Image: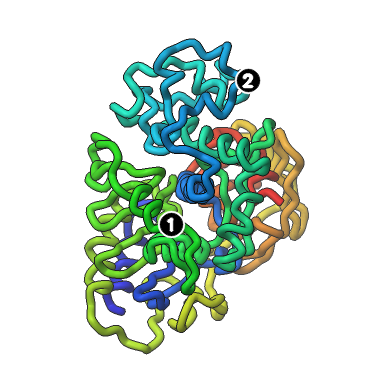
Protein backbone atom coordinates (compact mmCIF):
# COMPACT_ATOMS: atom_id res chain seq x y z
CA UNK A 1 0.00 0.00 0.00
CA UNK A 2 3.01 2.29 0.28
CA UNK A 3 2.81 3.11 -3.44
CA UNK A 4 -0.79 4.30 -3.09
CA UNK A 5 0.25 6.62 -0.28
CA UNK A 6 3.10 7.87 -2.45
CA UNK A 7 0.63 8.60 -5.24
CA UNK A 8 -1.62 10.58 -2.89
CA UNK A 9 1.39 12.53 -1.63
CA UNK A 10 2.71 13.20 -5.14
CA UNK A 11 -0.71 14.29 -6.38
CA UNK A 12 -1.44 16.63 -3.50
CA UNK A 13 2.01 18.20 -3.65
CA UNK A 14 1.31 19.46 -7.16
CA UNK A 15 0.40 23.12 -7.37
CA UNK A 16 -3.35 23.66 -7.02
CA UNK A 17 -4.27 19.97 -6.92
CA UNK A 18 -6.92 18.60 -4.56
CA UNK A 19 -7.97 14.97 -4.63
CA UNK A 20 -11.66 14.73 -3.76
CA UNK A 21 -12.34 11.01 -4.07
CA UNK A 22 -10.27 7.95 -4.98
CA UNK A 23 -11.05 4.27 -5.49
CA UNK A 24 -8.45 1.70 -6.56
CA UNK A 25 -9.68 -1.76 -7.61
CA UNK A 26 -7.86 -4.88 -8.64
CA UNK A 27 -9.40 -8.26 -9.55
CA UNK A 28 -12.75 -6.68 -8.71
CA UNK A 29 -11.75 -5.96 -5.11
CA UNK A 30 -11.25 -2.56 -3.51
CA UNK A 31 -7.60 -2.00 -2.57
CA UNK A 32 -8.11 1.53 -1.27
CA UNK A 33 -10.82 4.14 -1.19
CA UNK A 34 -11.10 7.52 0.38
CA UNK A 35 -12.61 10.99 0.24
CA UNK A 36 -11.41 14.36 1.45
CA UNK A 37 -13.92 16.44 3.35
CA UNK A 38 -16.24 18.03 2.49
CA UNK A 39 -16.54 15.41 -0.27
CA UNK A 40 -17.76 11.92 0.53
CA UNK A 41 -18.67 8.52 -0.93
CA UNK A 42 -22.39 9.23 -1.16
CA UNK A 43 -22.01 12.66 -2.74
CA UNK A 44 -22.23 13.17 -6.50
CA UNK A 45 -19.51 15.03 -8.35
CA UNK A 46 -19.63 16.84 -11.69
CA UNK A 47 -17.73 14.66 -14.16
CA UNK A 48 -17.33 17.22 -16.95
CA UNK A 49 -16.15 15.29 -20.05
CA UNK A 50 -16.00 11.95 -18.27
CA UNK A 51 -19.74 12.17 -18.98
CA UNK A 52 -18.84 11.30 -22.59
CA UNK A 53 -17.97 7.72 -21.67
CA UNK A 54 -21.45 7.26 -20.21
CA UNK A 55 -22.92 8.71 -23.42
CA UNK A 56 -20.83 6.26 -25.42
CA UNK A 57 -22.23 3.46 -23.27
CA UNK A 58 -25.77 4.57 -24.09
CA UNK A 59 -24.88 4.45 -27.77
CA UNK A 60 -23.48 0.96 -27.22
CA UNK A 61 -26.81 -0.24 -25.86
CA UNK A 62 -28.66 1.34 -28.79
CA UNK A 63 -26.33 -0.31 -31.31
CA UNK A 64 -26.69 -3.68 -29.57
CA UNK A 65 -30.48 -3.36 -29.62
CA UNK A 66 -30.45 -2.55 -33.32
CA UNK A 67 -32.00 0.89 -33.01
CA UNK A 68 -28.82 2.74 -34.12
CA UNK A 69 -26.50 1.88 -37.01
CA UNK A 70 -22.94 3.18 -36.69
CA UNK A 71 -22.71 3.44 -40.48
CA UNK A 72 -25.92 5.45 -40.88
CA UNK A 73 -25.58 9.19 -41.32
CA UNK A 74 -26.39 11.50 -38.44
CA UNK A 75 -28.80 13.33 -40.72
CA UNK A 76 -30.78 10.15 -41.40
CA UNK A 77 -32.09 10.25 -37.82
CA UNK A 78 -33.34 13.81 -38.27
CA UNK A 79 -35.13 13.97 -41.62
CA UNK A 80 -36.76 17.24 -40.61
CA UNK A 81 -33.37 18.91 -41.23
CA UNK A 82 -32.83 17.34 -44.65
CA UNK A 83 -33.75 20.42 -46.68
CA UNK A 84 -31.55 22.70 -44.56
CA UNK A 85 -28.36 20.62 -44.62
CA UNK A 86 -26.87 20.98 -48.08
CA UNK A 87 -23.13 20.49 -47.56
CA UNK A 88 -21.97 17.12 -48.89
CA UNK A 89 -19.59 16.49 -45.99
CA UNK A 90 -22.25 17.30 -43.42
CA UNK A 91 -24.65 14.96 -45.15
CA UNK A 92 -22.01 12.20 -45.20
CA UNK A 93 -21.22 12.44 -41.47
CA UNK A 94 -21.89 9.04 -39.89
CA UNK A 95 -22.70 8.03 -36.34
CA UNK A 96 -19.27 6.41 -36.01
CA UNK A 97 -17.65 9.69 -37.05
CA UNK A 98 -19.23 11.74 -34.27
CA UNK A 99 -18.56 8.92 -31.80
CA UNK A 100 -14.84 9.10 -32.64
CA UNK A 101 -14.63 12.92 -32.74
CA UNK A 102 -13.88 12.72 -36.46
CA UNK A 103 -16.73 14.78 -37.90
CA UNK A 104 -14.29 16.44 -40.31
CA UNK A 105 -14.19 19.71 -38.41
CA UNK A 106 -10.74 20.96 -37.52
CA UNK A 107 -11.55 22.48 -34.15
CA UNK A 108 -14.12 22.83 -31.39
CA UNK A 109 -17.39 24.18 -32.85
CA UNK A 110 -19.64 24.56 -29.80
CA UNK A 111 -20.00 28.33 -29.90
CA UNK A 112 -20.52 28.45 -33.65
CA UNK A 113 -22.96 25.55 -33.48
CA UNK A 114 -25.04 27.29 -30.79
CA UNK A 115 -25.36 30.28 -33.07
CA UNK A 116 -25.90 28.39 -36.31
CA UNK A 117 -28.54 26.13 -34.79
CA UNK A 118 -30.17 28.93 -32.80
CA UNK A 119 -29.72 26.98 -29.58
CA UNK A 120 -29.86 23.48 -31.09
CA UNK A 121 -26.32 22.06 -31.07
CA UNK A 122 -27.29 19.15 -33.29
CA UNK A 123 -28.68 21.34 -36.06
CA UNK A 124 -25.75 23.73 -35.61
CA UNK A 125 -23.25 20.91 -36.08
CA UNK A 126 -24.93 19.84 -39.31
CA UNK A 127 -25.08 23.41 -40.60
CA UNK A 128 -21.34 23.98 -40.12
CA UNK A 129 -19.57 22.49 -43.17
CA UNK A 130 -16.61 20.30 -42.10
CA UNK A 131 -13.24 21.40 -43.47
CA UNK A 132 -12.22 17.78 -44.16
CA UNK A 133 -14.00 14.56 -45.07
CA UNK A 134 -15.59 12.90 -42.03
CA UNK A 135 -13.43 10.16 -40.59
CA UNK A 136 -10.11 11.68 -41.67
CA UNK A 137 -9.21 14.13 -38.88
CA UNK A 138 -9.62 14.37 -35.11
CA UNK A 139 -11.01 17.42 -33.32
CA UNK A 140 -12.30 17.36 -29.76
CA UNK A 141 -15.72 18.78 -30.47
CA UNK A 142 -18.59 18.90 -27.97
CA UNK A 143 -21.43 18.90 -30.53
CA UNK A 144 -20.26 15.47 -31.73
CA UNK A 145 -21.12 13.96 -28.35
CA UNK A 146 -24.31 15.98 -28.20
CA UNK A 147 -25.31 14.42 -31.53
CA UNK A 148 -24.92 10.97 -29.94
CA UNK A 149 -27.24 11.99 -27.08
CA UNK A 150 -29.76 13.39 -29.56
CA UNK A 151 -29.70 10.20 -31.65
CA UNK A 152 -30.25 7.94 -28.64
CA UNK A 153 -33.13 10.12 -27.51
CA UNK A 154 -34.62 10.16 -31.01
CA UNK A 155 -34.69 6.36 -31.33
CA UNK A 156 -35.71 5.68 -27.72
CA UNK A 157 -38.03 8.59 -27.00
CA UNK A 158 -36.35 9.37 -23.67
CA UNK A 159 -33.26 11.35 -22.52
CA UNK A 160 -30.00 9.60 -21.64
CA UNK A 161 -30.65 9.32 -17.91
CA UNK A 162 -33.99 7.59 -18.46
CA UNK A 163 -32.53 5.40 -21.20
CA UNK A 164 -29.59 4.33 -19.04
CA UNK A 165 -31.59 3.75 -15.88
CA UNK A 166 -32.77 0.15 -16.61
CA UNK A 167 -29.78 -0.73 -18.80
CA UNK A 168 -26.84 0.61 -16.76
CA UNK A 169 -27.64 2.47 -13.56
CA UNK A 170 -29.96 -0.09 -11.97
CA UNK A 171 -27.95 -3.21 -12.93
CA UNK A 172 -24.74 -1.62 -11.60
CA UNK A 173 -26.43 -0.39 -8.43
CA UNK A 174 -25.88 3.28 -9.27
CA UNK A 175 -28.59 5.25 -7.51
CA UNK A 176 -27.19 8.78 -7.43
CA UNK A 177 -27.01 10.62 -10.74
CA UNK A 178 -28.33 13.66 -12.59
CA UNK A 179 -27.57 15.15 -15.99
CA UNK A 180 -27.78 18.74 -17.17
CA UNK A 181 -30.56 19.03 -19.75
CA UNK A 182 -30.81 21.80 -22.35
CA UNK A 183 -33.87 23.76 -23.43
CA UNK A 184 -34.53 21.18 -26.14
CA UNK A 185 -35.12 18.53 -23.48
CA UNK A 186 -31.90 16.63 -24.19
CA UNK A 187 -29.26 15.58 -21.66
CA UNK A 188 -26.26 17.37 -23.12
CA UNK A 189 -24.07 14.26 -23.27
CA UNK A 190 -20.67 15.94 -23.63
CA UNK A 191 -20.63 17.10 -19.99
CA UNK A 192 -23.06 17.72 -17.17
CA UNK A 193 -23.34 14.27 -15.58
CA UNK A 194 -23.12 14.20 -11.80
CA UNK A 195 -22.55 10.89 -10.04
CA UNK A 196 -20.38 9.30 -7.38
CA UNK A 197 -16.78 8.10 -7.42
CA UNK A 198 -18.07 4.56 -6.97
CA UNK A 199 -20.28 4.90 -10.06
CA UNK A 200 -17.16 5.77 -12.07
CA UNK A 201 -15.44 2.69 -10.66
CA UNK A 202 -18.42 0.50 -11.50
CA UNK A 203 -18.55 1.67 -15.11
CA UNK A 204 -14.82 1.07 -15.37
CA UNK A 205 -15.25 -2.44 -13.97
CA UNK A 206 -18.00 -3.14 -16.53
CA UNK A 207 -15.61 -2.24 -19.35
CA UNK A 208 -12.72 -4.11 -17.74
CA UNK A 209 -14.93 -7.23 -17.72
CA UNK A 210 -15.78 -6.62 -21.40
CA UNK A 211 -19.42 -5.78 -20.76
CA UNK A 212 -20.23 -8.33 -18.03
CA UNK A 213 -21.43 -7.44 -14.55
CA UNK A 214 -21.64 -10.07 -11.82
CA UNK A 215 -22.00 -12.84 -14.38
CA UNK A 216 -24.63 -11.02 -16.45
CA UNK A 217 -23.83 -9.63 -19.87
CA UNK A 218 -24.97 -6.02 -20.21
CA UNK A 219 -22.91 -4.82 -23.19
CA UNK A 220 -21.60 -6.94 -26.07
CA UNK A 221 -17.89 -7.62 -25.79
CA UNK A 222 -17.67 -6.48 -29.42
CA UNK A 223 -18.91 -3.03 -28.42
CA UNK A 224 -16.37 -2.73 -25.61
CA UNK A 225 -13.56 -3.64 -28.01
CA UNK A 226 -14.82 -1.25 -30.68
CA UNK A 227 -15.46 1.65 -28.32
CA UNK A 228 -12.06 1.45 -26.65
CA UNK A 229 -9.72 0.81 -29.58
CA UNK A 230 -8.04 3.80 -31.29
CA UNK A 231 -10.13 4.95 -34.26
CA UNK A 232 -8.17 8.04 -35.13
CA UNK A 233 -4.85 9.69 -34.30
CA UNK A 234 -5.15 12.66 -31.98
CA UNK A 235 -1.89 14.57 -32.57
CA UNK A 236 -1.70 16.04 -29.08
CA UNK A 237 1.39 17.25 -27.22
CA UNK A 238 0.73 15.54 -23.89
CA UNK A 239 1.71 11.85 -24.06
CA UNK A 240 -1.55 10.51 -22.63
CA UNK A 241 -3.57 12.54 -25.12
CA UNK A 242 -1.51 11.35 -28.09
CA UNK A 243 -2.35 7.64 -28.02
CA UNK A 244 -5.49 7.75 -30.19
CA UNK A 245 -9.20 8.14 -29.54
CA UNK A 246 -11.98 5.58 -29.46
CA UNK A 247 -15.72 6.14 -29.10
CA UNK A 248 -15.54 8.79 -26.36
CA UNK A 249 -12.63 7.00 -24.67
CA UNK A 250 -9.01 8.12 -24.74
CA UNK A 251 -6.23 5.61 -25.21
CA UNK A 252 -3.49 6.02 -22.60
CA UNK A 253 0.14 5.01 -22.25
CA UNK A 254 -1.35 2.33 -20.01
CA UNK A 255 -4.79 1.01 -20.91
CA UNK A 256 -7.51 3.48 -21.75
CA UNK A 257 -9.67 5.96 -19.91
CA UNK A 258 -12.55 8.36 -19.66
CA UNK A 259 -11.61 11.79 -18.34
CA UNK A 260 -13.09 15.15 -17.55
CA UNK A 261 -11.84 18.66 -16.87
CA UNK A 262 -9.94 19.31 -13.65
CA UNK A 263 -9.03 15.67 -13.08
CA UNK A 264 -12.10 13.43 -13.23
CA UNK A 265 -10.68 10.06 -14.26
CA UNK A 266 -11.75 6.51 -14.99
CA UNK A 267 -8.54 4.58 -15.66
CA UNK A 268 -9.06 1.08 -17.06
CA UNK A 269 -5.93 -1.07 -16.97
CA UNK A 270 -6.54 -4.51 -18.54
CA UNK A 271 -2.94 -5.67 -18.11
CA UNK A 272 -3.17 -5.07 -14.36
CA UNK A 273 -6.84 -6.17 -14.14
CA UNK A 274 -7.42 -2.85 -12.39
CA UNK A 275 -9.60 0.26 -12.35
CA UNK A 276 -8.82 3.63 -10.80
CA UNK A 277 -11.66 6.11 -10.24
CA UNK A 278 -10.76 9.63 -9.26
CA UNK A 279 -12.56 12.91 -8.69
CA UNK A 280 -10.46 15.98 -8.08
CA UNK A 281 -9.59 19.56 -8.78
CA UNK A 282 -6.45 19.49 -10.87
CA UNK A 283 -5.27 22.19 -13.26
CA UNK A 284 -2.58 19.76 -14.47
CA UNK A 285 -4.29 16.59 -15.66
CA UNK A 286 -1.18 15.18 -17.32
CA UNK A 287 0.72 15.67 -14.08
CA UNK A 288 -1.94 13.70 -12.23
CA UNK A 289 -1.65 10.85 -14.75
CA UNK A 290 2.14 10.97 -14.52
CA UNK A 291 1.85 10.50 -10.76
CA UNK A 292 -0.55 7.60 -11.26
CA UNK A 293 1.79 5.83 -13.67
CA UNK A 294 4.81 6.39 -11.43
CA UNK A 295 3.23 5.35 -8.14
CA UNK A 296 0.00 3.42 -8.69
CA UNK A 297 1.19 1.07 -11.43
CA UNK A 298 3.80 -0.64 -9.20
CA UNK A 299 1.07 -1.25 -6.61
CA UNK A 300 -1.23 -2.69 -9.26
CA UNK A 301 1.48 -4.99 -10.63
CA UNK A 302 2.17 -6.59 -7.25
CA UNK A 303 1.18 -10.24 -6.96
CA UNK A 304 0.00 -9.93 -3.37
CA UNK A 305 -1.54 -7.10 -1.40
CA UNK A 306 -1.68 -6.50 2.33
CA UNK A 307 -5.09 -6.96 3.92
CA UNK A 308 -4.31 -4.27 6.48
CA UNK A 309 -6.12 -0.96 6.38
CA UNK A 310 -4.08 1.73 4.72
CA UNK A 311 -4.44 5.20 6.22
CA UNK A 312 -3.29 8.32 4.42
CA UNK A 313 -0.76 10.30 6.48
CA UNK A 314 -0.06 13.04 3.96
CA UNK A 315 -3.39 14.83 4.22
CA UNK A 316 -6.46 14.08 6.32
CA UNK A 317 -8.89 11.72 4.60
CA UNK A 318 -12.01 9.76 5.44
CA UNK A 319 -10.54 6.34 4.72
CA UNK A 320 -12.47 3.11 5.07
CA UNK A 321 -10.89 -0.34 5.19
CA UNK A 322 -10.52 -2.37 1.99
CA UNK A 323 -13.52 -4.68 1.63
CA UNK A 324 -14.70 -7.42 -0.66
CA UNK A 325 -16.61 -6.19 -3.68
CA UNK A 326 -17.69 -2.58 -4.02
CA UNK A 327 -19.99 -1.86 -1.14
CA UNK A 328 -20.54 1.62 0.35
CA UNK A 329 -17.74 3.14 2.41
CA UNK A 330 -18.21 4.48 5.91
CA UNK A 331 -16.91 7.91 6.79
CA UNK A 332 -15.05 8.39 10.04
CA UNK A 333 -12.76 10.89 11.65
CA UNK A 334 -12.62 13.44 8.86
CA UNK A 335 -10.67 16.66 9.16
CA UNK A 336 -11.37 19.64 6.90
CA UNK A 337 -8.93 20.54 4.17
CA UNK A 338 -7.88 24.16 3.78
CA UNK A 339 -9.35 25.59 6.98
CA UNK A 340 -6.65 27.65 8.64
CA UNK A 341 -6.69 30.23 11.43
CA UNK A 342 -10.03 31.95 11.02
CA UNK A 343 -10.42 35.66 10.53
CA UNK A 344 -12.87 37.60 12.64
CA UNK A 345 -15.79 38.43 10.36
CA UNK A 346 -17.90 41.46 11.11
CA UNK A 347 -21.63 41.38 10.38
CA UNK A 348 -21.99 43.48 7.25
CA UNK A 349 -22.99 43.65 3.62
CA UNK A 350 -19.76 43.45 1.61
CA UNK A 351 -19.57 44.86 -1.89
CA UNK A 352 -17.06 44.22 -4.71
CA UNK A 353 -13.63 45.69 -4.10
CA UNK A 354 -10.25 45.68 -5.76
CA UNK A 355 -8.99 42.28 -6.85
CA UNK A 356 -12.46 40.85 -7.29
CA UNK A 357 -12.49 38.33 -10.16
CA UNK A 358 -16.14 37.29 -10.05
CA UNK A 359 -18.05 40.08 -11.76
CA UNK A 360 -21.44 38.39 -11.33
CA UNK A 361 -21.23 38.36 -7.52
CA UNK A 362 -22.93 41.53 -6.28
CA UNK A 363 -22.92 41.28 -2.48
CA UNK A 364 -21.66 39.02 0.29
CA UNK A 365 -23.62 39.31 3.53
CA UNK A 366 -22.42 38.03 6.89
CA UNK A 367 -25.07 37.92 9.59
CA UNK A 368 -23.90 35.92 12.57
CA UNK A 369 -23.73 32.32 11.42
CA UNK A 370 -25.34 33.07 8.08
CA UNK A 371 -23.58 33.83 4.80
CA UNK A 372 -25.56 35.04 1.77
CA UNK A 373 -24.11 35.33 -1.72
CA UNK A 374 -26.18 37.41 -4.14
CA UNK A 375 -25.43 37.18 -7.86
CA UNK A 376 -27.52 37.03 -11.07
CA UNK A 377 -29.37 33.95 -9.82
CA UNK A 378 -31.29 33.08 -6.70
CA UNK A 379 -29.39 34.25 -3.58
CA UNK A 380 -27.35 31.45 -2.05
CA UNK A 381 -27.96 31.28 1.70
CA UNK A 382 -25.41 29.26 3.64
CA UNK A 383 -24.59 28.38 7.22
CA UNK A 384 -21.22 29.56 8.52
CA UNK A 385 -19.61 27.63 11.35
CA UNK A 386 -16.68 28.53 13.56
CA UNK A 387 -14.48 25.44 13.11
CA UNK A 388 -14.05 23.08 10.17
CA UNK A 389 -16.52 22.65 7.38
CA UNK A 390 -20.16 23.63 7.75
CA UNK A 391 -22.50 22.17 5.14
CA UNK A 392 -25.68 23.61 3.69
CA UNK A 393 -26.95 21.01 1.29
CA UNK A 394 -24.29 20.52 -1.43
CA UNK A 395 -22.26 23.59 -0.40
CA UNK A 396 -19.72 23.76 2.41
CA UNK A 397 -18.13 26.80 4.05
CA UNK A 398 -15.03 27.18 6.20
CA UNK A 399 -13.56 30.30 7.74
CA UNK A 400 -10.03 31.11 6.57
CA UNK A 401 -7.34 33.57 7.58
CA UNK A 402 -8.73 36.17 5.16
CA UNK A 403 -12.43 35.37 4.96
CA UNK A 404 -14.35 32.31 3.82
CA UNK A 405 -13.84 29.40 1.46
CA UNK A 406 -17.00 28.16 -0.26
CA UNK A 407 -16.79 24.66 -1.72
CA UNK A 408 -19.45 23.57 -4.19
CA UNK A 409 -19.02 19.96 -3.14
CA UNK A 410 -20.93 18.45 -6.08
CA UNK A 411 -18.42 20.08 -8.45
CA UNK A 412 -14.62 20.42 -8.54
CA UNK A 413 -14.84 24.11 -7.63
CA UNK A 414 -13.84 26.19 -4.63
CA UNK A 415 -14.50 29.91 -4.25
CA UNK A 416 -12.17 32.00 -2.10
CA UNK A 417 -13.77 35.06 -0.50
CA UNK A 418 -11.44 37.71 0.92
CA UNK A 419 -13.49 39.97 3.21
CA UNK A 420 -12.21 43.37 4.25
CA UNK A 421 -14.10 44.33 7.39
CA UNK A 422 -12.60 47.82 7.42
CA UNK A 423 -14.12 49.03 4.15
CA UNK A 424 -16.74 46.28 3.82
CA UNK A 425 -15.55 45.02 0.46
CA UNK A 426 -14.91 41.55 -0.86
CA UNK A 427 -12.65 40.01 -3.47
CA UNK A 428 -13.79 36.66 -4.90
CA UNK A 429 -11.52 34.23 -6.72
CA UNK A 430 -12.10 30.74 -8.08
CA UNK A 431 -9.42 28.18 -7.31
CA UNK A 432 -10.42 26.67 -10.66
CA UNK A 433 -13.15 28.44 -12.60
CA UNK A 434 -16.24 26.58 -13.84
CA UNK A 435 -16.17 25.91 -17.58
CA UNK A 436 -19.49 27.72 -17.80
CA UNK A 437 -17.96 31.19 -17.38
CA UNK A 438 -20.72 32.66 -15.22
CA UNK A 439 -23.02 30.03 -13.69
CA UNK A 440 -25.45 31.25 -11.01
CA UNK A 441 -23.96 30.00 -7.77
CA UNK A 442 -27.30 28.54 -6.67
CA UNK A 443 -27.34 26.06 -9.58
CA UNK A 444 -23.82 24.68 -9.06
CA UNK A 445 -25.19 21.33 -7.96
CA UNK A 446 -26.58 18.12 -9.41
CA UNK A 447 -29.90 18.58 -11.27
CA UNK A 448 -32.75 17.10 -9.26
Q: CA distance from mark 2 to mark 1?
A: 32 Å
Is 406 left or right of 198, judged from the image as shown?
Answer: right
The residue wearing badge 2 is 80
Assess whether mark 1 and mark 2 are in contact (beta carbons under 8 angstroms).
Answer: no
Residue depicted at 64% across the width and 33% down the height: 360
Which of the image's four quarters has the N terminus?
Answer: bottom left
Residue 144 rendering spot, x and y as whole percentages:
46, 32
Residue depicted at 66% across the width and 64% down the height: 390
Mark number displayed over residue 220: 1
Q: Is residue 416 visible?
A: no
Q: Quadrant of residue 140?
A: top left
The colour scheme used here is rainbow
Give the SS element for disc 1: loop
Q: Quadrant of residue 119?
A: top right
- Disc 2 crowd rating (10 Å Cα; few below 14, some 14-19, many 20+) is few
Residue 368 rendering spot, x and y as whole percentages:
76, 58
Residue 188 rendering spot, x and y as whole percentages:
58, 38
Q: Is residue 41 visible?
A: yes
Q: Quadrant of residue 274?
A: bottom left
Between residues 363 and 45, which one lies in front from this camera angle?
Answer: 45
Residue depicted at 46% across the width and 31% down the height: 72
Give the SS element for disc 2: helix
Is the residue 388 above or below the residue 417 in the image? below
Residue 394 rendering spot, x and y as whole percentages:
66, 57
Amino acid sequence: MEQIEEFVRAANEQDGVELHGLMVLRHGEVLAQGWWEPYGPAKPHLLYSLSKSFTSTALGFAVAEGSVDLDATVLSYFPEFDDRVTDDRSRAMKVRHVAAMSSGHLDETIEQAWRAGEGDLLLGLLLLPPERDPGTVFAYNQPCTYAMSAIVQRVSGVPLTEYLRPRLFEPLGIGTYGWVRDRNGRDIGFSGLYTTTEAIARLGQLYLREGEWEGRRLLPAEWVAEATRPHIATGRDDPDWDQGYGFQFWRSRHGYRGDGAYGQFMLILPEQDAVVAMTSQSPNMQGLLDAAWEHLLPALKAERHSSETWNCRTRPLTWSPPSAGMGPAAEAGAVPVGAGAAAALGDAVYRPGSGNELATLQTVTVDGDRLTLADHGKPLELRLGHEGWTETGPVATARTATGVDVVFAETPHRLHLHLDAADRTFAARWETAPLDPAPPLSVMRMPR
